[in-house]
Image (tube, coloured by chain):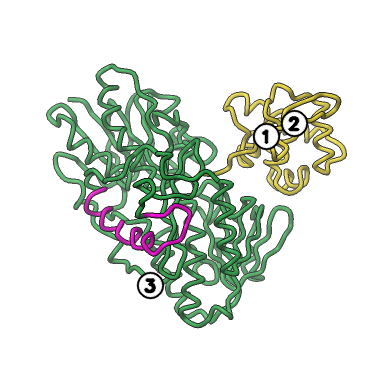
Amino acid sequence: MVAKTIAGKTVEVNEEGFMTNPNEWTEDIAVEIAKEEGIPELTADHWKIIHFCRQSAGTSGKAPTLRQITTGTGISTKELFTLFPKGPAKKVARIAGLGKPEGCV
Amino acid sequence: MKKLVILGAGTAGTIVANRFKRVMDLDEWQITLVDPDPIHYYQPGFLFIPFGMYTKKEVIKPKRDYISAPLTLIQSAVEEVDPAQRLVRLANKQTLSYDYLIIATGTDIHPEETPGMAEQEWGKSIHSFYTLETSLKLNQMLHNWEGGRLVVNVVENPIKCPVAPLEFIMLADWHFHKHGKRDRVEIIYATPLSGAFTKPVASRMLGELLERKNILVEPDFMIERVEPDARKIVSYDEREIEYDLLVTIPLNKGAEFIARSGLGNELNYVPVDQYTLRSKAYDNIFVLGDASDAPASKAGATAHFSIDLFTENFLRYVEGHELKPYFDGHANCFIETGFGKGLMIDFNYEQEPLPGRYPLPGIGPLTLLEESEFNHWGKLMFRWMYWHLLLKGMEVPLPSEMSMSGKRLV
C-alpha cells in the first residue's frame, strides 16, 4: 500500500491503484481517477453508475459485478462499455474509490 | 416428527442426506429429497469425455443406489418455495411442508442467454462440455475434426468448476499432440478475467504453463454475441475472434424456481451468510453446494468440505444453540495439465492458492501448483472415492478446513 495525492487529497491505494478506504473518496477524486482511466469528463450517466456502485458496496461491502450494475441501474452492458471502455466493472470500482470487484473465485 | 426437505439430489444434496441418515434420529426426523432427474452424474468426468478418456457409463448411476429408506426421494421439479408458509410446491402437484429446508439445486449452463450461441450452429461448430449431452457431442466432433482454430470462451463468472476451462484446453493440447494434429490446431482462450485464473499466484503460474504449451490467452474478453454463420465471437468492446470450433462455458445460473420464489440474486443464487451457509432472509433455510452466493468455488470439493462440519452445526442449531461460523471457503481442485500430469490447488476465502505439498506438509504425495504424474492419478482415483465414499456420506481422509502448513509463500 502506498499513499498517493489525488485532487489535492492524500489517500491510500494498493499496488493496482485501487483506493483501500472508500471513506477517503470525494467526487473530485473520482474526476481525477477517471482522467487517468482515459475518461475526460464524467457525464450524468457516469455519475449514476458511480453512485450506484458506492451505494451497493456500502450495503454488501464489496464492489458490484458487471451484472449487478446492469440489473441495478437498468443501463445495458453495451452502454457500460461505451461509458467505461474495457472492463467497466473494474474501471467504475476504481473511480468510485472501491476495491477491485471479485467477479469470481 | 420434524420435517427436513432437501431440494436437489446432486453432489451436495446426496452427501448431506446420507450424513444426516448416519447421525440423526430418524424416528424424530423425516427427510425428503426432491430432484427431477433419476440419474446421478459424476460431473468432474464430463471433462474427460470429449477426449475419450471416460465413457458415458463411467459417469452415471441411478440416484436410487445412493438414496434409500428411510430417506424419501421424490422425482419432480420444484415449482415454488413459499417460505412464509414453509411449503414447497412441486411440478407434480404435490405440496411438501417443512420445518427446515436445504436448497442444493446447483447451477446450470444457459447458452440461450448469449445471442447467436444456441442457434443453428449449436452442437455443430459451437460446443460445450458442462453437461453429459454436450460432452458426448463434443467427443464426436473432436473425433472427426481435421484441425483449425479452437477458441475456448468463458461467458461470465462465476462458473461451476472455475479451473475446468483451463483443464479442457490443456487436455485438448495433449489430445491433438497424440493424434498428430497439434501443428494444424491453433488454441485461443478468451476469458473475461485479466489473466488465466482468478487469484494472482495461480494466475501467473498457470499463465506461464499455457504459454509453454503455445496457447494464446485473450484477457478481459466479455462476450456480447456469437455470429454463428461468420464463425466469430464479438466482445462488448468490439474485439472479434474467428473460430473453426468454439467451445463455450455459457452463462451459469441457479435454478429458476429460486427466482420465482423471490429467493435469489441477479443470477438466481440464494444470498447466504458465507460462514454458516444459512439464508440471509430466512433462518430455517440453508443452501449447500453451488446454489448459494457464497464467494467460494462452485465445485464438488467445496460442497463436500462445507458439509463436513455442517451436519453437527445444524443439529446443535435445531436444539437452540447458535450457529458456529464454521466454513472457511475451503476448496481444492485437481487441474489436469495433459500428458498424464496434473497439478493441484488448495485455497479458501482468505488464502489464495500457493505452491507446496498436500495433504501432508513437506511430503504430499500431491504437489500444489506444480505438475506431477501422481496428481493425475489422484484425479482418476477420485472417481472411485466419489461413488464409494463421498456420496454415501462416509468420511474421506482429507481435512475440511484449509491448512497453511505445507504451503510456500511466494
Hue used for the chain lettered A: yellow
The residue shown at (80%, 42%) is A37
Badge 1 local density, few (<14 within 10 Å), some, or many (20+)?
some
Q: Is residue B356 left or right of residue B114?
A: left
Q: Which residues are magenta?
A: B366-390
For the stretch drawn in magenta, the main secondary structure is helix
- The percent coordinates of residue B143 (x first, y second) are 44, 78
Q: How far is mark 2 from mark 3, CA to CA?
A: 51 Å
Total marks shown come to 3
- The percent coordinates of residue B299 (x first, y second) are 41, 47
The residue shown at (51%, 79%) is B145
Badge 3 local density, few (<14 within 10 Å), some, or many (20+)?
some
Work out whether residue B301 can be spotted. yes
Instruction: Kindly check if marks 1 and 2 are in contact, taking CB atoms under 8 A apart as contact.
Output: yes
Task: Examine the structure image and report whether residue B379 is included in the region drawn in magenta.
Answer: yes
Do dots 3 and 1 share one subunit?
no
The residue shown at (75%, 34%) is A95
**Badge 1 amino acid:** Thr
The mark that comes first in sequence, 1 or 2, is 2
Label 1's element?
helix
- The percent coordinates of residue A104 (x first, y second) are 54, 44
Mark 3, residue position: B52
Residues B172 and B88: in front is B172
Instruction: Kindly check if marks 3 and 1 are in contact, taking CB atoms under 8 A apart as contact.
Output: no
Judging from the image, mark 3 belongs to the subunit labelled B
Q: Is residue B407 left or right of residue B22?
A: right
Mark 1, residue position: A73
Badge 2 local density, few (<14 within 10 Å), some, or many (20+)?
few
Judging from the image, mark 2 belongs to the subunit labelled A
Q: How far is mark 1 from mark 2, CA to CA?
A: 8 Å
Q: How far is mark 3 from mark 1, CA to CA?
A: 46 Å
